[in-house]
Amino acid sequence: MNAPSPSLPPPLDQNFLNSVLARHEGRPGALLAILQEIQQNHPRKYLPRETLTYVAERANIPLSRVYSVVTFYALFNLEPQGRHTVCVCRGTACHTRGSRDLLDNLLMSLGMDTREDGERDQLALTTPDGSVTVRTVACFGQCALAPVVEIDHVIYGHMNEQRLQREVKALEKMEQQS
Ligand code: FES
C-alpha cells in the first residue's frame, strides 16, 4: 500500500477508502469485502473507474484482478444506479407466468424500450434522470410466488400489470416529493 494516491472524484474521498482498505488489510477475501463496502457507501451504489484504480494501487492488486472480481459478481455495478430499483425475475416459473410482459410494459412505461430480445434476460438499465434502475434476475428462489418482482429490496409475489404500474407510480410520486 505504498503507491502515491491517485486523485478521486467526489463523493468517495481518500480518507474513507483508506479506512476501508486498512480495516480489511491482510484478511482472506479482502478484495470482495472492500469492494462491497465501497459500493454500499456510494450514493449511486456503483464503483467508479477511478475508485477501482485507487483500490488496485493502494492495495497493490493488479487492476485486471479487481476488474475480474467486479465483472464476475452480479452484485457489483460499474454504472451509477437509480435511486429506486425494480428487479423483474426472468426465471422459468416467472417467465411462464408472464414476467416477460411485465418487463416489456415496465420498460415502455419508463421510456426505456430499447433492447433486442436476447438482451432482456440480463438487463440493468437506468432512466436518464437517475430515478429508476430496471434489472432482471435469473431466480429469486421464490418460484411459488411467480411472477416475482423486487422493488427497492421488497419482494412482491404474484405480480400483475396493474399492481406493478401502481408501484411504479408510487416511486414517481416519491421522486416528485423528494
Ligand atoms: S423463477 Fe422467478 S422466483 Fe424462481
Image: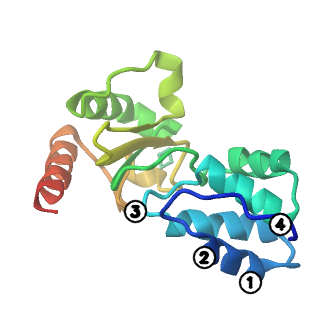
Say which mark, if any, is on residue 153. Answer: 3
Q: Residue placed farthest to the top in the image?
A: 116
Tag 2's secondary structure? Answer: helix
The residue under label 2 is 16
Mark 4 touches mark 3? (CB < 8 Å): no
**Is residue 28 shown left or right of residue 142?**
right
Of pointers 1 and 4, the one earlier in the residue sequence: 1
Kind of residue at disc 3:
His
Q: Residues within 10 Å of mark 1 (few under 14, many from 20)?
A: few
From this view, report whether residue 140 is shown above or below residue 24. above
The residue under label 1 is 23
Of pointers 2 and 1, the one earlier in the residue sequence: 2
Q: Residues within 10 Å of mark 3 (few under 14, many from 20)?
A: few
Q: CA distance from mark 3 to mark 1?
A: 28 Å
Kind of residue at disc 4:
Ala
Tag 4's secondary structure? Answer: helix
Kind of residue at disc 1:
Arg
* Image point (16%, 50%), residue name: 172
Q: CA distance from mark 2 to mark 3?
A: 26 Å
Q: Nearer the viewer, mark 2 or mark 1?
A: 2
Q: Is ligand 1 closer than 8 angstroms to the Cβ of mark 1?
A: no
Of pointers 4 and 2, the one earlier in the residue sequence: 2
77 or 123, which is in the foreground?
77
Mark 4 touches mark 2? (CB < 8 Å): no
The residue under label 4 is 59
Q: Nearer the viewer, mark 4 or mark 3?
A: 4
Kind of residue at disc 2:
Phe
**Is residue 163 shown left or right of residue 104?**
left
